[in-house]
Image: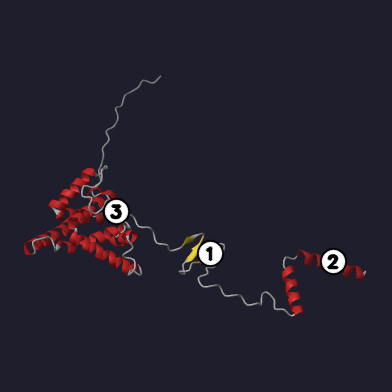
Amino acid sequence: MATNNNNHNDAYNNGVDESSPFLANQVDGADDKNSGKPSKESSPEKSPAPGYVNCGAEYGWTADGLPLGHGSVVGEPIRRNQWDSSLFACLGRNDEFCSSDLEVCLLGSVAPCVLYGANVERLGSSPGTFANHCLPYSGLYLLGNFFFGGNFLAPWFSYPSRSAIRRKFNLEGSCEALHRSCGCCGSFVEDDLQLEQCETACDFATHIFCHTCALCQEGRELRRRLPHPGFNAQPVLVMIPPTEQTMGRGA
């Protein structure tokens, strides 16, 4: 009777061993120990070649140290948007804003202080900022024309608005545009901080050398992207008269 039980246990253990998924690893380890050869687990792994990237099924790491998941690099910079019109497109584009572009061109040529104040007011989306920017601009405009014979002081005051528009709508700056077209501005720019400093310097240079065109370009961009804050300042109450009432005779 004991012999039958032992045979039954041996058969059961053999069946479990046969169905075990780790049987091959156990047998390989046992064979390596018996033969005196080092096992696969204890064998030293080869160091990867320089520049090798180990990307698993779900996550990995790029050569720059950024995590890689599902085929896309996490932290990849968002692509810049293009300006709606170029710097020297004074008359704008032939679309529904054509009349507005003509108004912007006239204001920039005759009264740049009014255009600058309107741009800042629309950018800030709050009424009342027009006078706070138009009056200082007018004073610098008059001083520059009186002492230097041209508008050389007001651009020092107005160029931050161009940088604010570029950051708000993620627009491509002059430095990035030159690097994309001819690759001449990418060698000395190492990080985002230096790139932003370069773009700010380009905004300043644009207002110094092409001040009127810069104001007009900013005005066209803002009018196509943002409504004027004065339109939303006062709610409009629409009164609908009641419909004509008639008395009907019931059946």
Q: Are marks 1 and 2 in contact (CB under 8 Å)?
A: no
Q: Are marks 1 and 3 in contact (CB under 8 Å)?
A: no
Q: CA distance from mark 1 to mark 3?
A: 37 Å
The circle drawn on residue 11 is 2
Looking at the image, is mark 1 or mark 3 nearer the viewer?
3
Q: Is residue 223 above or below residue 207?
A: above
Among numbered discs 2 and 3, the one appearing first in the sequence: 2
Where is mark 1, residue-wise?
59
Image x and y of residue 148, in percent: 8, 64
Image x and y of residue 1, in percent: 93, 69
The circle drawn on residue 83 is 3
Amino acid type of the residue that numbered disc 1 sits on in the rendered structure: Tyr
Left or right of residue 88: residue 136:
left
Image x and y of residue 165, in percent: 27, 58
Tell me what residue is drawn at x 25 percent, y 55 percent: 123
Quadrant of residue 186 within the rendered picture: bottom left
Quadrant of residue 180 within the rendered picture: bottom left
